[in-house]
């Protein structure tokens, strides 16, 4: 209760320190005078009485300090320590600057990466009760998580008792008119309760009402905040207006909040309901949706999964034709959204933590060196009356000053680093990781910074303190204690440098493995020549080209005009460009083979006649399509090598027929050729069986244009849109990019590239710090042994043997460090196996290269001190003592 | 040491007793530091010498607790000195400390008797 007034009293004393002191002075002077008077009255000579009084009174300064400590804070002494610490640090700017920069690098890297971890993995998703939201999908033989069929979804929604709401979504795209011509704009189609299940309410306008996703409902659309700003100028009266999507007027009923994000459909600008089912959604065997469910109270994800699996089983029995082997997957929604980025972020955080560890070890070994050279200073201060606790406090203060400066500088590094990293993420990639945009130095990140600074401060304060308590203070006064100190230093300091080198090895190996994976990934066998290929997405407005012959005619015109462009060799279409992902599959059945209703899932692609020629994919057997193979001719297909191997092992597939699961006569088609395995899936995905159908027999309105060029493919890109718009300005052209660019920017490549570069950056810093650390250790050891070396040389030791002695010591440290590091590296690499591609976690060339690089760097770092040792002048070395 | 006092060092005093003795001394009226020290010395038949090193920190402690008040006044010889006065809270505290002290002394006495 009395704490507070007492605090103010103390604080008052602190503010009136001078008055407090002068009053105490006066009081004590009075005391001494009285004592002197008393002594004189006792008959002591005045002179002697004065001396006696002063002596008996004791050390006034100490007395004052004692009195003051009763009433004041220890601020004063803290301030003194701080002053002294700053003076000490300024006296050796080299040490101070090195230590602060090292710390700042370590802290900056850790904090920047942690900020990303925070925003992606720790910060809850911006939905209501995000932990009770589940991602619901089907699962098939080929996919752990596959699209949901609308018919199945409708049954799941009706039958389940675990979700209070279950809503579906799928992507779509629409052509809209803009001042600069038609533009294909990504959108999404959802069931009516989609935003309610997420707990998102529109910023303007109304949500979809129940039943707005039923047939016959009006065409309504919600737009994102960003779309509202960029396409509608942020006008407040946008709600109620109509926008033409694919030529159909849609009423804008709402603007979504600015903070709204839904990573699975990150780039969607227009959100509509599924009130008109498309052809796929009418069939139970066609899968194009995903769903989000809100778990009922007390229902876990595992319970929901069990329930959905049993429902899937029921449907499988009821509809064996379409649902055989179709299971269900239920996982937390955040798992679906951040699951793929988590391992990479954790690897990066691990890398940053190792860098921080190396920086801390380095700084503490520097501190150790300093505490060695400050032994005399400490001993003198101790002899002059500084208490051990005061000396300890001095070290703690110095550590705090270092860590505070390093931490502040580190925070600014982190701030810049975060923004640079964010800028490096392309706009397209950002649409699928929208949560990363929220990265900032928030309270959690600052707490994390404070935490690691505290740890570092404790470590740094402990180092010299530990060191001090190991040897008695007074040893320092007689400088002969050097030998003992040297041994002690060698023991602790050497261990530290081994730790540093081992960490550097781990980081270098990690970076090496990631780099090599990335290289291998970009140089996988694509099955075609990816250079000199220009690509674009072409969207045919269905209002004009819904019918087959019209579509065939316009695609022929486009290909003809594009192929006639200067620098273009050939042009072709595919409904899905290579390296864009497996999927879009078809279930097949082979005529003349036993069939038990299993789902033989193969990638299905529609391609124009010149497609393989344009890709320069090798023909293995049979022939490619002819231009005139259209709907009037028998259905034909080309299959890839994997297809041939899997379904026709040891047979010639050319001439065989396949069809749908019930071999409907209209579905039967003949295999006319086998083509090399063109990489359809992501870079790290295996090649699936694939069938290619002539585009002229199966037209599509979303097409990928592939153009083989003779000149630099970048130069052709701008001409593509112009050429196509000359034919029909209503055709949408978007996403012009070179094939190489598409591959490099694909999400897989993107994630792996960022991981490889960042860990590589950390590794380079670690190498630098590790080598600097080793240099420091060897150089210090040499300086400590100058006399010993002098004696050795005076006794006839050759320069070469001095070299040998120093290099042997460094070699031992390096050897142990690298050895331990390699063992740790293999263990760590096993942990990040999931990120490695086409390479084992104990890739010998990488391990060997790292050992050689680090060994060479270490040799160089110890060569300079060794040379200094060898050039010691014995006479001077001995005289120095 | 100039005088052959039988001195009891502060470290030999039971903890807390100095504060109690200062409070007791001040019941007879305001005194300055030197006055308190000589008063204790006199009252203890020169057995207890209060060292300045303990006296002034103790006085600051008592001030902080609000058990004494301090003010600058002139002495009989017209020198300025800081006089300490017991407060009401200080008088109450003296009672508390005295009863604790007596409890302690009785207890120690019993132990010594039985031995």
Image (cartoon, coloured by chain):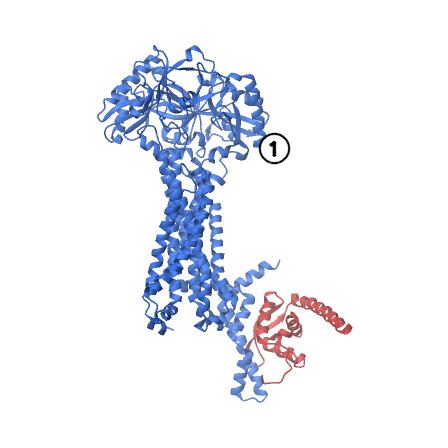
Chain colours: A blue, B red
Q: Given the current orientation, which residue lies at the most extreme left position?
A: A566
Among the 4 quarters of the image, the one containing residue A424: top left
Residue A228 percent coordinates (x, y)? 39, 29
Query: Which quarter shows the N terminus of chain A?
Result: bottom right
The answer, for residue A496, to whether it is visible in the render is: yes
Is B53 in front, or is A599?
A599
The residue depicted at 56 percent of the width and 88 percent of the height is: A44
Residue at the spot 47% in from the left edge and 48% down from the top edge = A446
Quadrant containing the C terminus of chain A is bottom left
Which residue is painted at 54% across and 85% down in the image? A49
- Tell me which chain the residue with mark 1 is part of: A
In the drawing, does residue A837 fall left or right of residue B9? left
On the image, which quarter does residue B82 sit in? bottom right
* Residue A270, position as x, y percentages in the image: 41, 26
Residue B9: x and y, percent? 62, 76
Mark 1 burial class by Cα count in 10 Å: few <14, some 14-19, many 20+: few
Residue B29 picture location, percent across and down: 65, 74
Q: Is residue B106 left or right of residue A874?
A: right
- Comparing A220 with A524, the one in front is A524
Q: Is residue A597 above or below residue A766?
A: above
On screen, A322 above or below A743? above
- Report whether residue A360 is seen: no
Furthest residue in direction right, as rendered? B114
How many marks the image carries: the answer is 1
User: Image height check: is B51 above or below A504?
Assistant: below
Per the image, the residue denoted by label 1 is A298
Instruction: Say which element carries label 1.
Output: loop
């Amino acid at each position: 209760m009395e704490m507070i007034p007492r605090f103010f009293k103390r604080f008052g004393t602190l503010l009136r320190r001078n008055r407090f002191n002068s009053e105490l002075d006066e009081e004590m002077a009075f005391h001494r005078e009285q004592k002197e008077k008393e002594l004189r009255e006792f008959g002591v000579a005045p002179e002697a009485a004065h001396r006696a009084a002063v002596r008996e009174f004791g050390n006034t300064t100490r007395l004052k300090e004692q009195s003051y400590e009763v009433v004041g804070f220890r601020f004063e002494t803290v301030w003194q320590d701080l002053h002294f610490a700053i003076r000490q640090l300024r006296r050796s700017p080299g040490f101070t600057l090195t230590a602060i920069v090292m710390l700042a690098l370590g802290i900056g890297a850790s904090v920047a990466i942690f900020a990303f971890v925070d925003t992606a993995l720790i910060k809850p998703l911006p939905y209501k009760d995000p932990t009770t939201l589940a991602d619901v999908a089907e699962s098939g033989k080929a996919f752990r998580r596959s699209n949901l069929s609308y018919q199945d979804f409708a049954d799941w929604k009706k039958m389940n008792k675990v979700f209070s709401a279950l809503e579906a979504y799928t992507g779509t795209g629409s052509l809209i008119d803009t001042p600069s011509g038609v533009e294909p704009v990504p959108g999404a189609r959802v069931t009516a309760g989609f935003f309610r299940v997420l707990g998102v309410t529109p910023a303007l306008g109304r949500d979809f009402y129940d039943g707005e996703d039923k047939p016959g409902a009006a065409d309504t659309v919600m737009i994102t905040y960003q779309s509202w700003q960029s396409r509608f100028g942020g006008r407040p009266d946008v709600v109620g207006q109509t926008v033409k999507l694919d030529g159909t007027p849609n009423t804008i009923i709402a603007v979504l909040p600015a903070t709204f994000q839904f990573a699975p459909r990150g780039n969607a600008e227009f959100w509509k309901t599924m009130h008109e089912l498309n052809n796929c959604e009418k069939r139970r065997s066609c899968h194009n949706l995903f769903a989000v469910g809100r778990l009922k109270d007390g229902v876990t994800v595992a319970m929901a999964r069990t329930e959905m699996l049993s429902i899937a089983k029921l449907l499988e029995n009821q509809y064996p034709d379409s649902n055989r082997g179709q299971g269900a997957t239920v996982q937390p929604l955040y798992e679906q959204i951040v699951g793929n980025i988590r391992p990479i972020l954790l690897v990066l955080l691990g890398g940053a933590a190792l860098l921080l560890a190396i920086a801390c070890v380095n700084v503490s070994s520097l501190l150790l060196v300093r505490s060695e050279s400050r032994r005399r200073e400490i001993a003198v201060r101790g002899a002059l009356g500084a208490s051990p606790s005061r000396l300890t406090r001095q070290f703690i203060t110095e550590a705090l000053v270092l860590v505070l400066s390093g931490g502040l500088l580190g925070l600014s590094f982190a701030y810049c680093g975060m923004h640079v990293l964010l800028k490096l993420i392309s706009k397209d990639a950002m649409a699928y990781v929208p949560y990363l945009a929220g990265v900032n130095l928030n309270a959690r990140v600052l707490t994390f910074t404070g935490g690691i600074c505290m740890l570092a401060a404790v470590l740094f304060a402990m180092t010299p303190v530990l060191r001090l308590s190991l040897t008695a203070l007074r040893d320092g006064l007689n400088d002969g204690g050097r030998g003992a100190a040297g041994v002690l230093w060698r023991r602790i300091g050497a261990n530290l440098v081994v730790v540093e080198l081992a960490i550097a090895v781990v980081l270098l190996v990690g970076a090496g493995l990631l780099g090599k994976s990335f290289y291998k990934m970009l140089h996988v066998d694509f099955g075609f020549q990816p250079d000199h290929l220009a690509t674009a997405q072409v969207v045919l407005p269905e209002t004009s080209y819904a019918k087959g012959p019209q579509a065939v005619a316009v695609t022929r015109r486009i290909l003809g005009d594009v192929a006639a462009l200067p620098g273009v060799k050939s042009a072709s279409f595919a409904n899905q460009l290579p390296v864009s992902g497996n999927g879009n599959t078809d279930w097949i059945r082979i005529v003349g083979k036993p069939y038990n209703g299993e789902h033989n899932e193969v990638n299905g692609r529609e391609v124009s006649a010149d497609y393989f020629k344009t890709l320069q994919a090798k023909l293995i057997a049979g022939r490619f399509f002819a231009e005139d193979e259209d709907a009037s001719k028998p259905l034909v297909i080309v299959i890839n090598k994997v297809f041939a191997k899997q379904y026709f092992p040891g047979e010639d597939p050319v001439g065989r027929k396949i069809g749908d699961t019930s071999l409907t006569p209209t579905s039967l088609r003949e295999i006319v050729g086998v083509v090399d395995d063109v990489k359809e899936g992501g870079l790290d995905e295996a090649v699936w069986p694939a069938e290619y159908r002539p585009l002229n027999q199966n037209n599509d309105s979303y097409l990928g244009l592939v153009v083989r060029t003779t000149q630099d493919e970048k130069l052709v890109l701008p001409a593509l849109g112009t050429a196509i718009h000359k034919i029909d300005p209503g055709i949408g052209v978007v996403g012009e990019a070179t094939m190489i660019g598409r591959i490099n920017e694909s999400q897989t490549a993107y994630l792996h590239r960022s991981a490889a570069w960042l860990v590589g950056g950390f590794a380079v810093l670690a190498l630098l710090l590790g080598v600097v650390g080793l240099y420091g250790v060897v150089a210090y050891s040499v300086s400590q042994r100058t006399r010993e070396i002098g004696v050795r040389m005076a006794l006839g030791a050759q320069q070469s043997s001095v070299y040998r002695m120093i290099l042997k010591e460094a070699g031992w440290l390096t050897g142990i460090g690298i050895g331990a590091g390699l063992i740790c590296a293999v263990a760590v690499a096993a942990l990040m196996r999931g990120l490695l591609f086409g390479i084992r976690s104990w890739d010998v060339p990488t391990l060997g290269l790292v050992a050689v690089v680090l060994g060479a760097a270490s040799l160089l770092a110890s060569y300079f001190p060794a040379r200094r040792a060898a050039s010691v002048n014995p006479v001077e070395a001995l005289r120095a003592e | 040491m100039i005088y052959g006092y039988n001195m009891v060092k502060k470290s030999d005093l039971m903890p807390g007793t100095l504060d109690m003795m200062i409070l007791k001394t001040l019941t007879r009226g305001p005194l300055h530091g030197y006055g308190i020290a000589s008063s204790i010395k006199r009252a203890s038949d020169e057995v207890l010498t209060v060292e300045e090193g303990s006296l002034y920190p103790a006085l600051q402690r008592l001030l902080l607790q609000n058990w004494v008040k301090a003010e600058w006044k002139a002495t009989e010889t017209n020198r300025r000195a800081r006089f300490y006065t017991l407060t009401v809270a200080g008088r109450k505290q003296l009672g508390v400390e005295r009863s604790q002290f007596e409890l302690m002394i009785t207890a120690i006495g019993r132990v010594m008797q039985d031995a």
